[in-house]
Image (cartoon, rainbow, N blue to C red):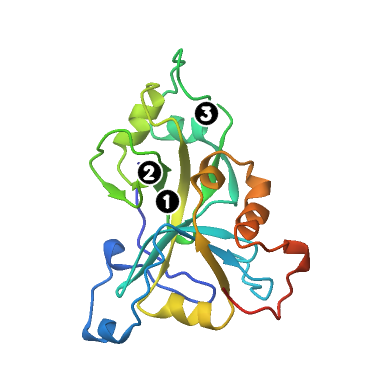
Amino acid sequence: MVKPSNPRKSSASSGASPKNLGYSDTSEDKVVAELNLSNHFLIAMPSMLDPVFGGSVVYLCEHNAGGALGVIINKPTDMSIDVLLDRIDLTLEIAPNGVPLDGKPVMFGGPVQVERGFVLHAPVKPYSSMMTVSDEIVLTTSKDVLEAVAHGAGPSRILVSLGCSGWSAGQLEQEIAHNGWLTVRADPHIVFDLPIEERFEAAMRLLGIDPAMLTGEAGHA
């Protein structure tokens, strides 16, 4: 995986990295209301004018009293997966049954650890640094998953991002309460299969909402 940088704070305002990026639990975590939005989408409300998170759909991988960790799934970088593999000294091999990745863009996952790779993929085999989010989606941050991809033996459904999004204890709950985000259980089809430009609207429609009818004054779900 690309060389990690120091964690940088993020959210719709300031934010912070969760415990698995260096965050330490404190006694104040106990006062955070029990809300687990792992395996959910965060959909930015029109009122969110933040240049990083405005118009974004975030897939939440972890959410607990210590904070939250997610990956933006609808903001591509100008780098493709094959270029990323080349930069970390891996060559994308042509495998007969391999997934076509040549030219597939790498996502901007968020402003935390922007030089580090975060890979959402279907669970096919254990990797050295892997977090199971659901039966259909896991998060891997170790290089071995990209080595498998380069050799044509990686997961068939994959989203590669540089950076992730992080919130400190209670921060995401506050942003939701202030109408910063809509939330809905995630659909793997939107994460892996749908064209990038269609993901925001598709996530909205999971809530039965027509994005054209949504205004910055709407409440949160």
Image quarter (top left, top right, bottom left or bottom right) of the C terminus: bottom right
> Against 221, is 192 above or below?
above
Image position of 17 with respect to 170: above or below: above
Q: Position of residue 76 (x, y in %)?
A: 59, 47
Is label 3 in a helix, a strand or a loop? loop
Disc 1 to disc 2, C-alpha distance:
6 Å
Mark linked to residue 192:
none
Give the residue number, with chain letter if any, for mark 1. 115
**Distance between the alpha carbons at the discs numbered 3 and 2:** 18 Å
Residue 81, horizontal then vertical, whole percent: 50, 34
Residue 172 at least partly seen: yes
Q: Mark number for residue 2?
A: 2
**Is the Cβ of the residue at disc 1 closer than 8 Å to that at disc 2?**
yes
Residue at x 23% of width, y 76% of height: 25
Tell me which residue sits at (45%, 38%) in the image: 158
> Please, is residue 181 above or below residue 109 in the view?
below
Left or right of 170? Residue 219 is right
Q: Residue furthest front?
A: 208
Residue, x 78% and y 63% (percent of image)? 212
Q: Quadrant of residue 136?
A: top left
Q: Going by the image, does 210 lie left or right of 178? A: right
Q: Nearer the viewer, mark 3 or mark 2?
A: 3
